[in-house]
Amino acid sequence: MQVAGLLGVVAGACFIAAFVLDPTPPVAGARGADVLSHGVAFSGADRAAAFLFAASGALLIAFLSGLRELLRSASPGPSWVGTAMLAGGIEVGTLLASTSVLFFTVASRTDVEGVAQARLLSDLSNYGFVFVGFGVMLMVVAAIPLMIRARGALRVLGELGIVVALLLIPYLVTAFFTSGAFVAGGVVTIIGFSAAGAWVGLTSLALLLLEPRALYGGASGASFVSATHD
């Protein structure tokens, strides 16, 4: 579980670093000229950010594989729910990687892209990152009942997952906007994306740092340790 937690922490670090490299890329509906000028100014940073987003998606899948095994033993919930959680993570990792390809391309080809082409690729990137939210929603919603049925820190993380799931609703709605506060790629998208990332990060730290009793709580922790030893 500590290895899974470490992988999750590294995934979160990659995710945060990608945000820091370029916190204000063009939003959906941005003018092609603005996309090109931004690409020229932030070409290296955006390519690095795309690479890190893709890496975070791959590491997320490995982390969720470990979390599923933990919840299978620590929570009395049905095993298929854990599989659904992992499936959501696989969707997230796949979309993050494929969308990062588009993001990387925009930043790499500013010398030959036309205005219309740049705008199309930018919008594809923004909508791709928004639709990652469907996988995130499945991942979080599936994890919630398993975590809440456990005890200790897992239960608290499950309750926090409810808040994250609610924040993901307006996050997904941003797909329908190209202006205003709800524009895809704008502040609402960033809040939803960040909330999901924070939930993964806190869960990863719990797996990495907490003792079994604090992580699973009471009888759940004892049952898990006993099953592991058997």
Image (cartoon, rainbow, N blue to C red):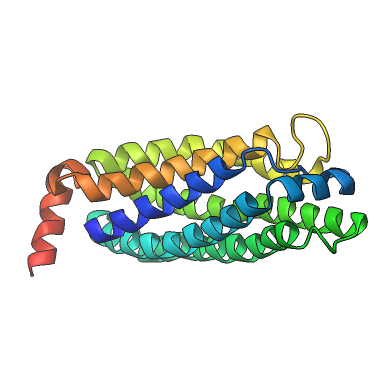
Image position, residue 19 (x, y; %):
56, 43
**Residue, x 49% and y 34% (percent of image)?**
163
Q: Is residue 87 above or below residue 20?
A: below
Q: Quadrant of the C terminus?
A: bottom left
Residue 182: x and y in percent read: 74, 34
Residue 74 falls left or right of residue 82: left
Residue 72 is left or right of residue 114, and the answer is left
Q: Report the residue at 72% width, 42% height from top.
A: 173
Res. 127 in view: yes
Q: Position of residue 27 (x, y in %)?
A: 76, 42
Instruction: Answer above or below: position of 188 versus 97.
Output: above
Residue at the outermost top position: 181
Q: Position of residue 175 (x, y in %)?
A: 75, 46
At x 64%, y 66%, the residue is: 98
- Residue 160 or residue 29, whichever sits in front: 29
Which residue extends farthest bottom?
A: 230
Q: Is residue 1 visible?
A: no
Residue shown at 81%/45% (left/top)? 37
Closer to us: 148 or 182 = 182
Out of 109 and 17, give the one closest to the viewer: 109
Between 228 and 35, the one lying in front of the other is 35
Can you say whether 91 is above or below 193 in the image?
A: below
Judge left or right: residue 216 versus residue 50: left
Residue 65 occupies quadrant = bottom left
